[in-house]
């Protein structure tokens, strides 16, 4: 079962963080659930006025996250790729994962990885944080990015310049 062994980390006050979401547009129901989950995490972490930017698909997440990263303390990337009968799935998933990792490391900005990589739509719906879903990956991605941004802010206040 996915999510088994996940840490139980209480939300922290992140009201002073600048946060952006970049979200793909494919699979509207799943994406609406992921965005709603991220919004719930923002409320729990006291984030005020996060910016939400929509892009056509998951492949476009890294370049948009790279444009946002210099101006925000955390960026949450939300998307979904559902396996089909061609290698498209592997290419898009690999490009999104590698690209978002690069953005995070190049800009020293946490990127919440809320990209669902599923075999079918049923799996995506089960992870989208909708009523009846077993998981809330939008919430988890946003919470992880916020927790990491808060940690980096503490490190920088102590003189860490990396």
Image (cartoon, helix red, strand yellow):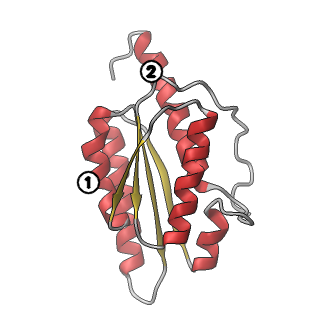
Residue 86's quadrant in the figure?
bottom left
Residue 59 image position (x, y, % from top left): 32, 65
Residue 39 image position (x, y, % from top left): 55, 46
Where is 11 relative to 63, above or below?
A: above
- Left/right placement of residue 71 relative to residue 9 reads left
Distance of mark 1 from mark 2, alpha carbons? Answer: 24 Å
Mark 1 vs 2, N-terminal side: 1
Q: Secondary structure at mark 2?
A: helix
Tell me how many marks there are.
2
Q: Residues within 10 Å of mark 1 (few under 14, many from 20)?
A: some
Q: Secondary structure at mark 1?
A: helix
Query: Which mark, residue 63?
Result: 1
Query: Which mark, residue 153?
Result: 2
Residue 140 image position (x, y, % from top left): 60, 48
Q: Residues within 10 Å of mark 2 (few under 14, many from 20)?
A: some
Residue found at x 42% / y 38%: 110
Residue 75's quadrant in the figure?
top left
Residue found at x 53% / y 44%: 142
Residue found at x 52% / y 54%: 35
- Left/right placement of residue 128 relative to residue 55 reads right
């Amino acid at each position: 079962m996915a999510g088994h062994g996940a840490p139980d980390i209480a939300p922290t006050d992140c009201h002073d963080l600048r946060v952006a979401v970049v979200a793909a547009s494919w699979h509207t129901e799943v994406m609406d659930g992921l965005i709603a989950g991220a919004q719930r995490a923002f409320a729990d972490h006291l984030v005020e006025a996060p910016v939400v930017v929509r892009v056509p698909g998951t492949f476009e997440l890294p370049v948009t996250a790279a444009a946002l990263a210099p101006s925000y303390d955390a960026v949450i990337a939300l998307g979904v790729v559902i396996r089909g009968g061609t290698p498209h799935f592997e290419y898009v998933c690999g490009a999104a994962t590698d690209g978002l990792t690069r953005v995070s490391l190049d800009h020293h900005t946490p990127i919440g990885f809320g990209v669902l990589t599923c075999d079918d739509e049923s799996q995506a719906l089960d992870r989208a944080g909708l009523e009846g879903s077993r998981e809330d990956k939008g919430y988890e991605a946003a919470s992880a990015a916020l927790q990491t941004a808060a940690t980096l802010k503490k490190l920088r206040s102590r003189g860490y310049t990396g």
